[in-house]
Image: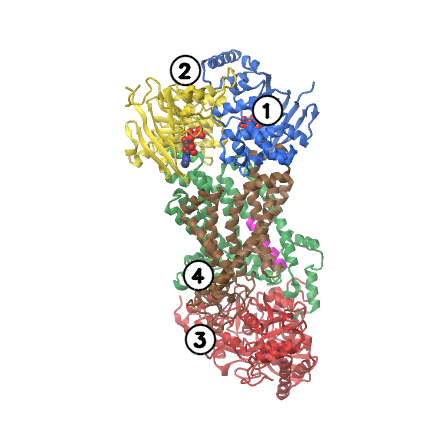
Chain colours: A green, B brown, C red, D blue, E yellow
């Protein structure tokens, strides 16, 4: 499928340009944040010589473009520098904290798709009915409170008052699961420990749902409005005039073309989760990237800030490319067209 | 006008939205008269009445230094609304102009402007705002700046897409044929046709700005005490769950009510203005 | 599975993020807990009394300003390497070279040298009476192991093993590190070969978790999923837990809550202004804010600059109290008028309790007609800002305690003019009388002499009011009833050093 | 003698990614002052592309366009913009839905500084009357007009510039027959009255028969034949032209006869 | 006597809108005999498409629509039929062709898939292979050169003319007794339109399918239909055989309509009013063209 390959190549190229832009922006921001990173890192008792030594090591006294040059040089070797906060390579830190965050986001993303899309389909099919209104209220509520408010409310109800779910952590202490992928739900399965898997799944339900709620709302609302629009297209009237079953029309004929515009936004929502995960993780003591992210920003840990933002943005761009490919897969017009729009 | 009323009244949810927003706006504007303890919006400590569950005269209970939560929530609405309006007042003109120019002119201008927009879009909003807040002192003004910085690209994107569609419309061709100037075509011909979508998005966004501002203050980057702020109230109160539940639940509900109301209103506006998508 | 009687016992506790495992960098409470259990020091505080007892050192002798220590010969590191004088010298050199954490305690020590395999000599540049006490902050590192694991860096010692020691221990302690994640938790297990032996009743495994939310801890303890809270729980949460039947553990390690005034910037460069503020502050309300029950609180009324029980402190009965009239008089003598004030009251974002004190002050000072604004600062930024007097807020709040248990480590770093510009000394105090008293305190060797020196210091500090002495601090911990910790519940078994009560080998697991 | 407008070897190539589309292929034709030249052809034959080049929306890829003997530059001067006007196919989109009829008409006056300010409003009113609409339509929004009325407004806008040449791109194909008839009538009258020149683009040959002086037949971007209307319909040279005429749905017997005659020729020719 | 495939009597339709009730059909009656091709002509908005949608039962689902009148299909009153029965008629006994063939085919499914779906309406158990064979035959009927390839394609990969043929093949695939064609092919070029109309005409003749042919183009109607109803603003104003109508238009509206069509033979553009009081004159029925069961003039 050459058009798809071309699309992929073009998107990768654009993403790379954007990523360079992101790195410049965040690099600059990180460096103009007030405060001397070396002083913060070394603490109050370090001598001025020690602070200066660290500044030299970080090239802090060079001009910004020169610093950026050093950064690029290191980056080309896959080196994001050492975190001043944990004294470990930023890549190591991110590799350690990212899987937990990703696991949370993936589960939330699945919830968003598996709950949000069907709700949207139902609302569109029965538009104007009580089911439509009910879905609307539910989805609007979902998007009307930040995920941390939902996190707190869900926690209060389902962990404090009705202790149905655990209130913190990824898995009970009693399970020792060797870390292979960092994704606990995968690692437990790799270890063949089904009870541990169930336990991990049980831990992830509340945080993921809190994180997913606004995405569910967005996805459902979008699917509904796109589908309502699709319902006005001639091919739906044609399907109806041929008496295709309503359910089939909803689930296939109207849904699939509607999914195409929805997917782009769902991709963006997915990306928004990367940010919101920061808040949910804080509430559920989820050992992900968030605490690290907040801590490094507060401590002006240059390398870690740039590294974290860069990784998150790269993931965002990857998600968007995946979404584009998915759209290309669903939309034959892109798959077969000679021009990549 | 009659049509608008018909659409509003036909849908009980839209009506609910109008009512909720009216309530929120009224409480924000008339907080001085409605709040039972207006002075509690500031630095007041009353250790005789601290951490009290809801009871008369403290409708929503009191916080840890004895201030009436209900009064503070009313004043917090005021801040949230001002913040939302100011952020949009700055972000929308910037985003809209860039979107219009990129969409209409095309070519290199479009490529450069849209890639810059992509850069801002591909940093998750919260992360971007956090970095910005790290850069600036955590004051209300800077909070607004940070939120603005993350907000404009969304308008650019919206208006850019609209413009590209509008550009194909016959009236743009007609204006070009007549010889109208580019600024005229962009701002007088195309822009008015984007206004309904922009206004609708603004209504929805007023809610979201409140959300984002709350999220920022949840992370400790927003409005500073003693100024009441819904997000920080939720964040600070969360430490005292489940015992002092009112500290979190009422500010949380307050956010919910306002944003829910703006969403309903935005939906209604979308119907009335006939905006698609 | 094993029968319950033989089941492994686990103790779970939490602290604020982040746990620092490197002995050269460890400084805060969480780090102290790690150090006191994983590493050993030459001396340790005496349980249930003042003074220091031999530990890795069998004995020592003072020789003018030199100290010579004889090491025990039966101590082995976790690696199996025997403890030698070389290790002690290495640990000291490393601490000095890194210059971080608590290394400032050893400013007056010029060098350490191995006299022979089991003898170490410390050379001090001047007489320094708190030196022995400082040694509880010099964890002894396994030199051989570290040298085998040097990371990248310049010079002979490369990175001094920083990369290695940030995730691993090279130590002799009663507990070994099983896993360490500075954000999440450190898991420790009993060291069966500990040179003093570890009692069976002590927990087999200890999980120290970092950065749990107060609400989480509160529920985990209630649900039997957690054992000891951090000392940073807000009083309301402690109250709820106590009401649920949790035991409340306490530790008073000679610390206090200080409200510090920047003496270099107007208007607080005028002593009368400072006096006015310290008279206007509502001490009673401040103490009430941290009350958990009628007789247990996170603090007790302060009597002056030095916490009750230390050299130079005033009697417990002479508590400070608010005097608005006096405050007004001082204000009248102040060269600035109230309307010139716009005080920046900062509080540390990580310690939400301080927000309430900021509000209390704002309200208190407003009664004098003084305007103020509240500013939240993250800890890292605060420590950086105080390095320059012009960036330092007018008012900052800090909890300070004597890191070695000696008043010198509490007061010198706060008030000596040479120590200005750290988080402990945002006053930038420069007062000859204070400096003299502090210097005397650390060179005097007799208890009487020190008492006199610090008493004078206390009086002078009350006179020039660089700080508001808000309350004497007492750390409270809510805990499950699955264990006993005599060092944290029985005053006769307590240590005079903050954090030492968390010596796990002295705890007893009692089952559910 | 100079032509009003002439196209010399004009081509237009669009590039779509890697592919190129030759929308107009080496076309030369002249438009004489006062005539109505029809351009017919099937969808995609390049009719609108020609129109857009005449209007200066985009320049030709090759060849040149001249106005009264002068070659038109890529960036048109205002006077050229004023001289050549356009009426589009879709009356729904050719008027800005967010501006009143009056505002749309005034734009032309304002841009070209026609008439002094205070009198422009009256001028707009007169224009409306000229196209058979009441003057109080000035404040109406396009949404409140029928298709035929909108098309009249679009015509009025073209007239506002007092231009010499009006390009009409399928001006009636979206209208009902009755409305179409009236609009065509109006166009014919205006041409008379104002001595306008039309380039009339359409695919409807029965309209062409009744309004055009000359007809240019296009296929796939190429000009197949260009003859006076009478001749085209009496004796189309090109089989494609015959096919076009043969496909026109007709309503009277005479028409059927004409069609059948042409089709016979076609079959004979083949 | 020939059987009547469809009979509509006194059909009325109104929509509830924000401005109150909007009456769209004011009691129209029409019928189509078996194998007959009947045209409904009128200007835009006169109510042609809504009539078609009511026949298929599509408008009935709309809550804002108010419908009254009688609908009889092959002798049964459709309103008495249970919903499921009525639904079963669609795509089997009745089918429809739309104006714009390309946008009437689903852009994300292959033609073959959609064809299969259509065939399943009549024969629910039909396998992929069977339906494929059948579809190929049907597409061959409408002169599609490479039916196999067409089935593998998406609608946007085929030309408008091809799509139109596919639509015709689909519409006739289940041998319906009634085909409704709503302005078929007006979105296409004249030459293509002429070809497909001829093709369609041949096919329905062969299958004796009744056709309701909706158009605003009198020329097309003349070539296709046996009988014509002229509709003006929701009222039938004239009904006649095609020949009769074009030879002798009697209603003022019909006359205006006819004279407004530009002639390919020339003759200029006549002076015509778009709206006139005369257009509201009562129904004119040509001899022998009355509704069954009504007194014929
Ligand atoms: N801006 C453009 N970019 C790319 N291709 C174009 C562009 N404009 C026109 N084309 C192509 O040029 C060819 C001629 O188009 P044009 O619009 O001139 O046809 P037309 O004769 O006006 O057709 P219609 O009767 O459908 O309006 C078509 O193949 C079209 O796809
Ligand atoms: N769902 C609806 N709600 C309200 N009014 C409607 C609806 N559908 C159709 N109408 C109105 O009914 C009238 C008849 O519409 P219909 O689509 O039948 O016209 P038509 O004769 O097919 O016209 P055209 O030739 O433009 O297709 C129009 O005035 C239209 O506005
Ligand atoms: Mg065209
Ligand atoms: Mg229709």
Asked if the residue at label 1 sits under 8 Å from ligand 1, the reply is yes
Residue that numbered label 4 is attached to: A155
| The C terminus of chain A sits in image quarter | top right
Asked if the residue at label 4 sits under 8 Å from ligand 2, the reply is no
Please report, as a chain letter, where disc 4 is located.
A
Are discs 1 and 3 less than 8 Å apart at CB? no
Observer able to see residue D88 = no
Q: Where is residue E151 in the image (x, y as percent from the top left)?
A: 45, 30
Residue lying furthest bottom: C448
Residue that numbered label 1 is attached to: D221
Dot 3 and dot 4 within a common chain: no
Dot 1 and dot 3 within a common chain: no
Please report, as a chain letter, where disc 2 is located.
E
Is C12 a magenta residue? Answer: no
Q: Distance between the residues labelled 1 and 3?
A: 92 Å
Q: Distance between the residues labelled 2 and 1?
A: 40 Å
The circle drawn on residue E247 is 2
Q: How crowded is mark 4: few (under 14 residues within 10 Å), some or many (20 or more)?
A: many
Judged from the image, the secondary structure of the residue bearing numbered disc 4 is: helix
Q: Position of residue A331 (x, y in %)?
A: 49, 38
Q: What stretch is highlighted in magenta?
A: A302-316
Q: Is the magenta stretch mostly helix, strand or loop?
A: helix
Please report, as a chain letter, where disc 3 is located.
C
Residue that numbered label 3 is attached to: C247
Q: Distance between the residues labelled 2 and 3?
A: 107 Å
Is A308 a magenta residue? Answer: yes
Asked if the residue at label 2 sits under 8 Å from ligand 2, the reply is no
Q: At x 53% / y 18%, what residue is drawn?
A: D210
Q: How crowded is mark 3: few (under 14 residues within 10 Å), some or many (20 or more)?
A: many
């Amino acid at each position: 499928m050459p058009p798809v390959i071309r699309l992929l190549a073009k998107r990768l190229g654009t993403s790379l340009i954007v990523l360079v832009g992101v790195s410049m922006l965040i690099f600059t921001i990180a460096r103009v944040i007030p405060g001397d990173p070396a002083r913060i890192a070394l603490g109050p008792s370090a001598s001025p010589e020690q602070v200066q030594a660290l500044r030299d090591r970080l090239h802090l006294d060079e001009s910004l473009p020169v610093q950026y040059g050093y950064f690029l040089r290191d980056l080309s070797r896959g080196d994001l520098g050492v975190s001043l906060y944990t004294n470990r390579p930023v890549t190591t830190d991110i590799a350690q904290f990212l899987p937990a965050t990703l696991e949370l986001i993936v589960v939330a993303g699945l919830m968003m798709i598996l709950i949000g899309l069907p709700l949207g389909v139902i609302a569109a099919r029965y538009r104007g009915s009580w089911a439509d209104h009910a879905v609307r209220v539910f989805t609007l509520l979902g998007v009307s409170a930040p995920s941390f408010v939902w996190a707190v409310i869900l926690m209060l109800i389902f962990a404090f008052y009705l202790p149905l779910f655990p209130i913190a952590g990824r898995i009970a202490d009693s399970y020792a699961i060797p870390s292979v992928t960092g994704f606990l739900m995968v690692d437990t399965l790799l270890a063949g420990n089904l009870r541990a898997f169930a336990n991990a799944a049980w831990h992830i339900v509340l945080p993921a749902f809190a994180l997913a709620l606004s995405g569910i709302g967005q996805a459902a609302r979008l699917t509904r409005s796109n589908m309502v629009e699709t319902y006005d297209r001639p091919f739906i009237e044609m399907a109806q005039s041929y008496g295709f079953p309503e359910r089939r029309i909803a689930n296939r004929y109207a849904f699939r073309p509607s999914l195409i515009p929805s997917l782009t936004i769902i991709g963006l929502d997915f990306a928004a989760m990367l940010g919101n995960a920061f808040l949910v993780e804080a509430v559920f003591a989820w050992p992900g990237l968030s605490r690290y992210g907040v801590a490094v920003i507060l401590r002006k840990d240059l390398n870690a800030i740039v590294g974290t933002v860069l990784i998150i943005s790269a993931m965002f761009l990857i998600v968007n490319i995946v979404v584009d490919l998915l759209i290309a897969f669903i939309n034959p017009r892109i798959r077969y067209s000679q021009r990549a729009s | 006008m009659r049509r608008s009323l018909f659409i509003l009244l036909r849908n009980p949810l839209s009506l609910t939205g109008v009512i909720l927003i009216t309530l929120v706006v009224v409480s924000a504007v008339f907080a001085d008269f409605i709040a039972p303890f207006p002075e509690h919006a500031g630095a007041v400590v009353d250790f005789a009445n601290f951490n009290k569950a809801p009871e008369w005269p403290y409708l929503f209970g009191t916080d840890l230094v004895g201030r009436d939560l209900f009064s503070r929530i009313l004043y917090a609405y005021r801040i949230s609304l001002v913040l939302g309006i100011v952020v949009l007042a700055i972000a929308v003109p910037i985003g809209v102009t860039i979107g219009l120019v990129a969409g209409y002119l095309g070519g290199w201008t479009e490529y450069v402007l849209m890639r810059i927009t992509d850069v801002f879009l591909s940093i998750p909003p919260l992360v971007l705002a956090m970095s910005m807040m790290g850069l600036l002192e955590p004051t209300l003004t800077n909070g607004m700046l940070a939120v603005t910085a993350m907000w404009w690209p969304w308008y650019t994107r919206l208006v850019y897409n609209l413009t590209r569609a509008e550009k194909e419309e016959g009236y743009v061709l007609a204006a070009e044929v007549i010889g109208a100037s580019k600024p005229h075509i962009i701002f007088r011909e195309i822009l008015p046709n984007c206004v309904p979508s922009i206004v609708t998005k603004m209504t929805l966004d007023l809610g979201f700005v409140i959300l984002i501002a709350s999220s920022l203050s949840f992370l400790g980057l927003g409005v500073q005490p003693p100024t009441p702020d819904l997000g920080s109230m939720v964040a600070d109160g969360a430490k005292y769950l489940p015992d002092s539940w009112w500290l979190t639940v009422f500010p949380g509900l307050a956010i919910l009510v306002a944003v829910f109301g703006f969403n309903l209103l935005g939906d209604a506006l979308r119907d009335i203005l006939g905006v698609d998508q | 599975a094993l029968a319950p009687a033989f089941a492994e016992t686990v103790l779970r506790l939490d602290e604020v993020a982040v746990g620092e495992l490197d002995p050269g960098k460890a400084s805060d409470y969480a780090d102290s807990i790690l150090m006191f259990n994983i590493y050993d020091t030459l001396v340790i505080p005496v349980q249930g009394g003042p003074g220091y007892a031999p530990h890795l050192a069998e004995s020592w002798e003072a020789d003018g300003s030199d100290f010579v220590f004889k090491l025990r010969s039966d101590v082995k590191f976790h690696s199996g390497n025997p403890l030698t004088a070389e290790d002690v010298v290495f640990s000291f050199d490393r601490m000095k070279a890194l210059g971080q954490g608590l290394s400032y305690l050893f400013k007056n020590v010029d060098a350490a040298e191995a006299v022979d395999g089991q003898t170490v000599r410390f050379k001090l540049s001047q007489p320094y009476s708190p030196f022995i006490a400082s040694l509880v902050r010099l964890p002894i590192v396994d030199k051989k192991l570290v040298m085998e694991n040097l990371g990248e860096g310049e010079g002979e010692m490369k990175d001094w093993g920083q990369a290695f020691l940030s995730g691993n221990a090279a130590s002799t302690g009663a507990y070994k590190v099983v896993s360490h994640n500075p954000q999440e938790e450190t898991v420790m297990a009993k060291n069966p070969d500990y040179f003093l032996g570890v009692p069976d009743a002590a927990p087999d495994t200890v999980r120290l978790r970092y950065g749990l939310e107060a609400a989480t801890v509160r529920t985990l303890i209630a649900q039997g999923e957690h054992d000891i809270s951090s000392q940073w729980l807000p009083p309301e949460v402690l109250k709820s837990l106590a009401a649920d039947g949790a035991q409340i553990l306490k530790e008073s390690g000679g610390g206090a809550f200080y409200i510090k005034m920047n003496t270099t910037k107007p208007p607080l460069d005028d002593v009368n202004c400072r006096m006015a503020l310290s008279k206007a502050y509502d001490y009673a309300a401040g103490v009430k804010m941290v009350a958990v029950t009628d007789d247990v609180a996170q603090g007790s009324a302060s009597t002056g600059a030095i916490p009750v029980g230390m050299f130079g402190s005033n009697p417990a009965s002479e508590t400070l109290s608010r005097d608005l009239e006096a405050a007004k008089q001082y204000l009248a003598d102040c060269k600035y008028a109230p309307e010139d004030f716009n005080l920046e009251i900062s509080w540390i974002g990580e310690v939400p309790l301080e927000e309430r004190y900021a509000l209390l002050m704002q309200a208190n000072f407003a009664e004098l007609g003084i305007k103020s604004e509240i500013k939240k600062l993250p800890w890292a930024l605060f420590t950086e800002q105080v390095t320059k007097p012009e960036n330092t807020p007018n008012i900052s709040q800090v909890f300070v305690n004597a890191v070695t248990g000696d008043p010198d480590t509490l007061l010198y770093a706060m008030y000596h003019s040479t120590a200005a510009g750290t988080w402990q000394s945002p006053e930038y105090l420069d007062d000859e009388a204070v400096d003299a008293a502090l210097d005397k305190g650390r060179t005097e060797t007799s208890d009487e002499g020190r008492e006199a020196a610090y008493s004078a210091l206390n009086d002078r500090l009350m006179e020039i009011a660089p700080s508001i002495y808000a309350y004497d601090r007492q750390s409270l911990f809510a805990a499950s009833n699955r264990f006993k910790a005599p060092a944290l519940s029985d005053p006769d078994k307590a240590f005079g050093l903050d954090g030492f009560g968390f010596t796990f080998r002295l705890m007893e697991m009692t089952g559910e | 003698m100079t032509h009003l407008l002439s196209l010399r070897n004009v081509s237009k190539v669009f590039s779509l990614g890697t592919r190129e589309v030759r929308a107009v292929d080496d076309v030369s034709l002249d438009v004489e002052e006062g005539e109505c030249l029809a351009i017919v052809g099937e969808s995609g034959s390049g009719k609108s592309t020609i129109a857009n080049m005449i209007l200066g929306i985009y320049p030709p890829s090759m060849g040149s366009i001249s106005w009264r003997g002068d070659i038109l530059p890529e960036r048109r001067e205002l006077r050229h913009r004023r001289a050549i006007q356009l009426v589009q196919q879709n009356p729904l989109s050719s008027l800005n839905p967010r501006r009143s009829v009056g505002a749309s008409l005034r734009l032309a006056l304002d841009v070209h500084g026609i008439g002094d300010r205070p009198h422009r409003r009256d001028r707009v009113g007169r224009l409306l009357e000229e196209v058979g609409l009441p003057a109080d339509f000035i404040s109406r929004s396009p949404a409140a007009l029928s298709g035929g009325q909108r098309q009249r407004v679009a015509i009025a806008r073209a007239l506002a510039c007092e231009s010499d040449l009006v390009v009409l791109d399928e001006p009636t194909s979206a209208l009902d027959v009755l409305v179409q008839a009236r609009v065509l009538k109006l166009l014919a009258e205006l041409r008379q009255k104002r001595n306008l020149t039309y380039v009339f683009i359409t695919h409807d040959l029965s309209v062409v028969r009744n309004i055009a002086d000359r007809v240019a037949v296009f296929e796939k971007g190429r000009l197949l034949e260009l003859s006076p209307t009478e001749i085209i319909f009496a004796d189309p040279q090109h089989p494609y032209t015959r096919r076009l005429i043969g496909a026109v749905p007709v309503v009277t017997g005479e028409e059927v006869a004409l069609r059948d005659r042409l089709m016979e020729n076609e079959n004979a020719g083949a | 006597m020939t059987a009547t495939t469809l009979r509509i009597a006194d059909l009325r339709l109104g929509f509830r809108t924000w401005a109150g009730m909007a009456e769209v059909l004011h009691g129209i009656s029409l019928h189509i005999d078996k194998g007959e091709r009947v045209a409904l002509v009128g200007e835009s908005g006169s109510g042609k498409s809504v009539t078609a949608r009511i026949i298929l039962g599509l408008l009935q689902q709309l809550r804002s629509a108010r419908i009254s009148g009688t609908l009889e299909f092959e002798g049964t009153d459709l309103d008495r039929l249970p919903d499921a029965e009525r639904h079963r008629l669609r795509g089997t006994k009745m089918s429809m062709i739309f104006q714009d063939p390309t946008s009437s085919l689903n852009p994300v499914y292959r033609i073959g898939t959609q064809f299969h779906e259509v065939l399943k309406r009549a024969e629910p158990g039909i396998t992929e292979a069977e339906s494929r064979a059948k579809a190929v035959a049907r597409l061959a009927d409408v002169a599609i050169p490479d039916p196999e390839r067409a089935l593998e394609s998406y609608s946007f990969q085929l030309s408008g003319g091809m799509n139109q043929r596919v639509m015709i093949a689909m519409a006739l695939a289940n041998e319906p007794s009634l085909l409704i064609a709503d302005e078929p092919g007006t979105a296409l070029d004249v030459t293509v339109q002429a070809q497909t109309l001829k093709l369609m005409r041949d096919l329905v003749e062969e299958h004796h399918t009744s056709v309701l042919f909706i158009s605003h183009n009198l020329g097309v109607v003349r070539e296709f239909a046996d009988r014509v109803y002229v509709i003006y603003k929701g009222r039938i104003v004239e009904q006649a055989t095609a020949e009769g109508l074009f030879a002798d238009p009697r209603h003022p509206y019909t006359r205006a309509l006819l004279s407004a069509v530009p002639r390919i033979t020339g003759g200029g553009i006549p002076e015509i009013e778009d709206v006139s009081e005369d257009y509201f004159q009562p129904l004119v029925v040509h001899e022998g063209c009355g509704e069954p069961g009504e007194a014929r003039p």
